[in-house]
Amino acid sequence: MSRTITVIPGDGIGPEVTDATLTVLKEAGADLEYDTQLAGLTALKEVRNPLPKATLESAERSRVILKGPLTTPSGSGFRSINVEIRKTFDLYANVRPVRTIVPGGRYENIDLVLIRENTEGLYVGVEHYIGVEGDPHAAAESVMIVTRFGAERIIRYAFDYARSRGRKKVTLAHKANILKYTQGLLLEAAAEVAKDFPDVESEERIIDATAMQLVLDPYRFDVLVMENMFGDILSDLMAGLVGGLGFAPAGNIGEDAAMFEAVHGSAPDIAGQGVANPTALLLSACLMLEHLGDPETAGTIRDAIDAVIQKGDARTVDMGGSATTEEYTRALVEAL
Ligand code: NAD
């Protein structure tokens, strides 16, 4: 029996890359049914709620979401719906693999995985203004929250992930030299959890030095694990190692639910032009197929992506080509 998943096309380039992804999934023979739902700015405009009840109910039923990017207003306006969904379903592990697909870039043969804690840290949204002498915005405070439970859970996930996929090393990237308590808990957890994984090499490294080393010599890393905001920032850096955000997929994994999305946002600068690269969402769909127990179809789609990009005549603009989203998608369908 085919599995029903919740699909949220999202904002900006979301509907364009979602259409391309569903076309390829269908052509590859993925045994899926889709329950399409609204969220984000599109939902706010259409039903005056950025996270409608119907969307949450669909996700409650399906427990698997394929999501396009959602626009989040900066500075004011509604809070991030991405963060809201991750918290609602306790999707604590954000798994972000990057690998080289386009040859001839800055680095060849990159194959790294960043695992970002997804429910704690500075992104818990505990923040407020402090008024002083008539200025209600004289100061602002954001609280970073790390629990021993959350720290151990994400680090154990990273070691389990490394072991189950035959990876050699887990690096905890942290800032425990300055944030001694919150980041210190992650350091403590890593020292404890590593004892259960003598077959996986373990190291800890300060986050700023990690950023520099990732650019100088990315090959020294394998699986990296870190708190929420550090992971948000470094996963964009790592996307840059393999040619940009068009190639960076993500799986948000919890105990009994998961959401798959591209690392990139709604790209308002190119939305509606039909030129977006759908590869990141497609690779996210591949992570979803693996999660659903269908690695064969995921492999077939990845092979088609590799073949089309390496052939080179249907690359989108961000890959240095001139193909539209539709032309690139057609080439993928032909390759399948
Ligand atoms: P962005 O990722 O949308 O865009 C950054 C740059 O990368 C832009 O120049 C864009 O054109 C390009 N780009 C991104 N994806 C691309 C693709 N698939 N093909 C070709 N080029 C692509 O980041 P931003 O501009 O900082 O954010 C825009 C909005 O997206 C904001 O509202 C932000 O909050 C939101 N956002 C959402 C998510 C999510 O839903 N998970 C993630 C990040 C940002």
Image (cartoon, rainbow, N blue to C red):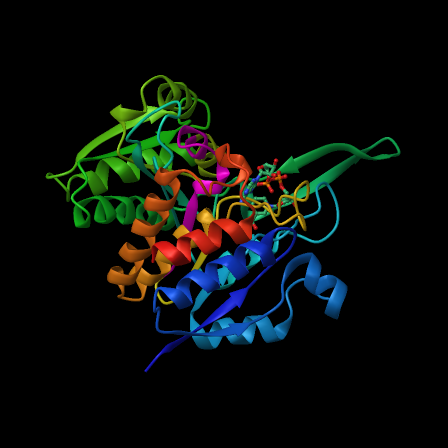
Is residue 109 shown in magenta?
A: no
Residue 86, given in percent of the width and then of the height, sits at: 49, 57
Taking depth in this image into account, of 118 and 40 the one nearest to the observer is 40
Q: Residue furthest right?
A: 134
Query: Depth check: 80 or 35 in front?
Result: 35
- Hey, which residue is sitting farthest left in the picture? 199
**Magenta span includes 245:** yes
Q: How many marks?
A: 0
Name the spot of residue 120 as percent of width and height, x first: 47, 47
Q: Nearer the viewer, residue 204 or 7?
A: 7
Side of 15 where 250 appears, left or right = left
Residue 336, given in percent of the width and then of the height, sits at 34, 58
Q: Position of residue 160 (x, y in %)?
A: 22, 49
Name the one closer to the observer, 121 or 77: 77
Q: Residue at x 33, y 62 (%)?
A: 289
The residue stretch that appears in magenta: 238-254
Q: Is residue 16 left or right of residue 100?
A: right
Of the four image quadrants, the one with ligand 1 is: top right
Identify which residue is drawn at 38% across, 45% down: 308
Task: Residue lying at the far bottom in this picture: please name it.
Answer: 1
Question: Which quadrant is home to the N terminus?
Answer: bottom left
Identify the residue at horizontal 40%, vertical 27% (top origin). Answer: 176
Q: Quadrant of residue 200?
A: top left
Left or right, 229 with respect to 47, comes to left
The vertical placement of 104 against 74, above or below, is above
Q: Is residue 252 visible?
A: no
Residue 18 can be seen, yes or no: yes
Q: Is residue 233 positioned above or below 68 on the image?
A: above
Give left or right: position of 188 versus 83. Answer: left
Residue pictured at 38% horizontal, 34% vertical: 102
